[in-house]
Amino acid sequence: MINIELINKIFKNSYIEINTNHNEALNVFENYINKSKKYIPILLNFDAHSDVYINSKIYNASIANWVNFCFKRHKITELYWIMPDYISKNPEYKRIYDYSKFTKGPLINLENSNSDFNNITKQQLFFNNKTNELITQTKLKQINKKCKLFNMPNIENKLTDLIPVNIYILTISDLNILNGKEVLLSIDADYFCNSGFDTIERINNNNITDEELNNDINYFLKEIYESKINPLAVSLTHSPIYIQKRHKENIQNFFNAIKNAGIN
């Protein structure tokens, strides 16, 4: 059974909304900001996918890139992507996250990092407020090299819309890095059970049982509670095309329990 007591302790002061698709988290956080008149610069995202696009100009938010728009709309300057253990502890899946694939499009891993997720990986990128492009260090160096070639100032000096953003990739075991911090919290159901649909090389944990799912949820709750994180606003996303249908009811009950524990 899911630990309702821990849920009530963790989320008793949280603004909470349940939604279908992950880009709806943008609305959840906007609703919280409009209600509280408070910006929280830290986004904590539990997800099988990063939902971040790098080195790509984008103009419309989708389930694949909605986090980019958090940097602009919600003044996020720190993103913590919590990768599921079923990815980080699987040698075959870890191989897929090799840093050499880090060029443009969906974020998989950070530059000059390997797929050893026993350690927290961190990197500073730069967000362009005009194009919603998250620019990597390598691309920035390439641009500045061209600027120097044409005797132009570095891009950091001429673009006031360029905002430094810190990205962290980690697993739940390192969540204490956020000890006591106020956060915007996003939980995608595919963090717990992913069918592999539309996921890189169909990464999944399709064979997870109901008992294993409940154990993973309770482990998640324990780590959140022990880290003393303060989730002021919480987005709970079903992502129905990604989760196994047989787990839909369990996820719904889990999300409802969180929703019922909140202040709204």
Image: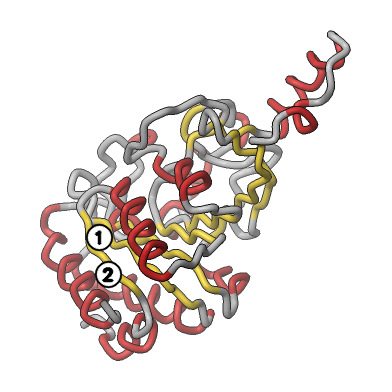
* 129 lies left or right of 253: right
Q: Nearer the viewer, residue 93 or 58?
A: 58
Number of numbered discs present? 2
Q: Nearer the viewer, residue 169 or 230?
A: 230
Q: Residue at x 27, y 69 (%)?
A: 212
Q: Quadrant of the C terminus?
A: bottom left
Q: How far across and down, in percent of the image, does residue 89 sit?
A: 48, 56
Q: How far across and down, in percent of the image, does residue 230 sit?
A: 48, 77
Q: Which residue is mark 2?
A: 212
* 246 lies left or right of 225: left
- Crowd class of label 1 (few under 14; some 14 to 19; many from 20; radius 10 Å): some
- Crowd class of label 2 (few under 14; some 14 to 19; many from 20; radius 10 Å): few
Quarter of image, res 190: bottom left
Secondary structure beneath dot 1 equals: loop
Q: Residue at x 27, y 57 (%)?
A: 237
Q: Residue at x 29, y 35 (%)?
A: 198
Q: Which residue is mark 1?
A: 208
The answer to whether the residue labelled 2 contacts the one labelled 1, judged by CB atoms less than 8 Å apart, is yes
Q: Which three-letter amino acid code belongs to the residue tagged 2? A: Glu
Residue 212's place in the image compared with 125, above or below, is below
Q: Residue at x 29, y 50 (%)?
A: 24
Residue 222's place in the image compared with 238, above or below, is below
Q: Residue furthest top?
A: 150
Secondary structure beneath dot 2 equals: helix
Q: How far across and down, in percent of the image, does residue 222 sit?
A: 42, 81
Distance between the alpha carbons at the discs numbered 2 and 1? 6 Å
Q: Nearer the viewer, residue 232 or 37?
A: 37
